[in-house]
Amino acid sequence: MVIPLLVQAMSESRTAAFTRVGNDWRHWMRTAKTLFGASKILRCERERGPASIEIFTIWTELMLTAFGIECLIKAIWLRQGHPLAQNGKYVPMPNEEPHNLVKLCHAARIALDSRETDALERISYIARSIGRYPIAKKAGQIEVGLSWNSVDDGIIQNLIVKLQKKLRQNAT
């Protein structure tokens, strides 16, 4: 519940609160759920019909899903006993690149098959670029012929279930 967390945070120093919240896998899991929920809401609005801007939100939906997956990976990392916050600062995972879900999975020892790897590479690109900006950071980073379809949706949904299951297991 938000109120007890707020009261507890007010009695702690900002650094201590940041470190405590940043290292609690439950907060990362909860954030993942809200990101998945936001993506689902956008999708439902888009599928209602082409009456408004929502028909253009597919990349934004996928960006939100990618950020949710990233939160699940980081929750798993925490369950494995690693920190993500120390002394009031974020502690990156080994070889962390912004929103590169394949590298994050490798760091957290999450096995991926070739279909999962391919889908995660594409959704990572979407999260870093066209999900939130009209262009990538450099022309050479533009994905020509980028596509996404219902098969990809299924791969990602199955991966989310796999990550949630791994999260519920004891830390390894």
Image: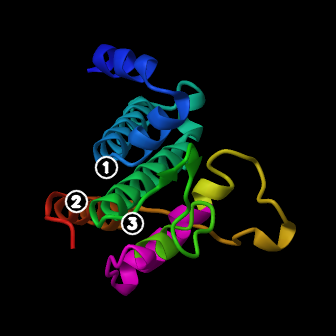
Secondary structure predominantly adopted by residues drawn in magenta: helix
Mark 1 touching mark 2, by CB under 8 A?
Answer: yes
Quadrant of the snapshot with the N terminus: top left
- Residue 64, relative to residue 112: is it above or below? above
Viewer-side residue, 81 vs 132: 81
Q: Residue furthest left?
A: 169
Q: Residue at x 53, y 25 (%)?
A: 51
- Residue 133, relative to residue 151: is it above or below? above
- Give how far apart the Cα atoms at labels 2 and 3 are: 22 Å
Counting from the top left corner in percent of width and height, residue 30 is at: 31, 39
Residue 167's disc number: 2
Counting from the top left corner in percent of width and height, residue 29 is at: 31, 46
Viewer-side residue, 98 vs 159: 98
Q: Amino acid at mark 2?
A: Leu
Viewer-side residue, 31 vs 23: 23
User: Closer to us: mark 1 or mark 2?
Assistant: 1
**Which mark is first along the chain, 2 or 1?**
1
Q: Residue furthest right?
A: 139
Q: Please give the residue where the numbered disc 1 appears in the rendered image.
A: 25
Counting from the top left corner in percent of width and height, residue 106 is at: 43, 79
**Element type at mark 2:** helix
Q: Amino acid at mark 1?
A: Trp
Residue 100 within the segment the image draws in magenta: no
Q: Please give the residue where the numbered disc 3 appears in the rendered image.
A: 152
